[in-house]
Amino acid sequence: MGGKYINPFTDFGFKRLFGTEMNKELLISFLNSLLHNQEEITDIRYRNTEQLGSGIMDRKAIFDVYCQNTAGEYFIVEMQKAEQDYFKDRSVFYATFPIRDQAQPGSNWDFKLKGVYTVGILDFVFPDDEYAPDCMHHEVKLMDVEDKHVFYDKLTFVYLEMPKFNKTEDQLETMMDKWLYVLRNLSRLMERPAALQERVFNRLFEQAEIARFSKNELFDYEESLKVYRDLFNVVNTAEGKGYTKGKAEGLEEGIAKGKAEGREEEKVEVAKKLLALGTDINIVRQATGLSIDDINNLL
């Protein structure tokens, strides 16, 4: 596999580091480094990552990591490996599950809610230059557009555009810098950087070292890495085809059309590869944005 440490952008790598009870100190440290205006998280409780709608026909959601802190606040942490149509809509939709789950039976509930945080670690940048090239960390709340004050502070979306993070080891200043550096570079490191001396990183590098894996863990990681590489290659190929076609037409609308067609080809190709690896159809739907019917047509 050509590396000493796991790739945290794979499903196996991400869930090994952040989605297990034995490594919850890693998730706690990571969340505390991002959420500056919140009280420090001292402990978390993992919750079921599969969330069902209230009715049998309702769409369900499967989170990468879902937990609560001791104050009862909810945290959804998602690793997003490729750009999707309606990505923001999906984030808002996912946030409705922990909101809905707080409803209490009976007529005496006063509608008081605990905070809900959605953290999206993006292996892509938002399209159309929505943010400046040096702006990669975004904290979004409901805001009054007139005077710019936060209208509602119990619903927070944090997005990290990881391709924009380019700090070197000697430029790391904050704990957030260090966590982002680890996520961006872990699979390329051959030894632990001198700048990462905090105790929590002892645990991280111990858990990330591939040589420590059991035979079953190694197999699962290899399968997860294969899916990640296939997705990465398909995305690059589809984007290349889209831009080439748009350029050949010689018009801005041609570029837009080419990009759109490239994304559709990308979704289908990714879905085919994931299905061939035996991936659950609902995970394929989330990864590609295709409908269940479209996916069934590929089987």
Image (cartoon, helix red, strand yellow):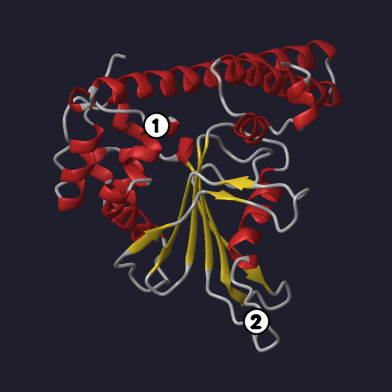
Q: Nearer the viewer, residue 174 or 60?
A: 60
- Give the percent coordinates (x, y) of residue 29: 30, 56
Place of residue 66 in the rendered image (x, y in percent of width and height, measured from the top left):
47, 53
Q: Position of residue 299 (x, y in %)?
A: 71, 16
| Dot 2: element | loop
Which kind of residue does numbered mark 1 sit on?
A: Phe
In this rendering, the answer to whether 265 lies above or below 40 is above
- Between 162 and 224, the residue placed more toward the observer is 224
Q: Tell me which amino acid carries mark 2.
A: Phe
Tell me: 117 left or right of 110.
Answer: left
- The residue beneath circle 1 is 12
Residue 192 versus residue 29 in the image, above or below: above
Asked if residue 288 shows in the view, the reply is yes
In percent of the image, x 49 and y 45: which residue is there? 134
Picture quarter with the N terminus: top left
In the image, residue 296 lies at what x, y percent?
75, 23
Q: Residue at x 64, y 52 (%)?
A: 52
Instruction: Answer whether labels 1 and 2 touch (C-beta < 8 Å).
Output: no
Residue 74, numbered label: none
**Residue placed at 62% from the left, 13% from the top?**
237
Q: Which mark is residue 111?
A: 2
Q: Residues within 10 Å of mark 1 (few under 14, many from 20)?
A: many
In which quadrant of the rendered view does residue 265 lie? top right
| Crowdedness near tag 2: few (<14), some (14–19) or many (≥20) residues, C-alpha within 10 Å | few
| Quadrant hosting residue 210 | top left
Q: Does label 1 or label 2 sit earlier along the sequence?
A: 1
Considering the numbered disc 1 on the image, is that residue within a helix, a strand or a loop? helix
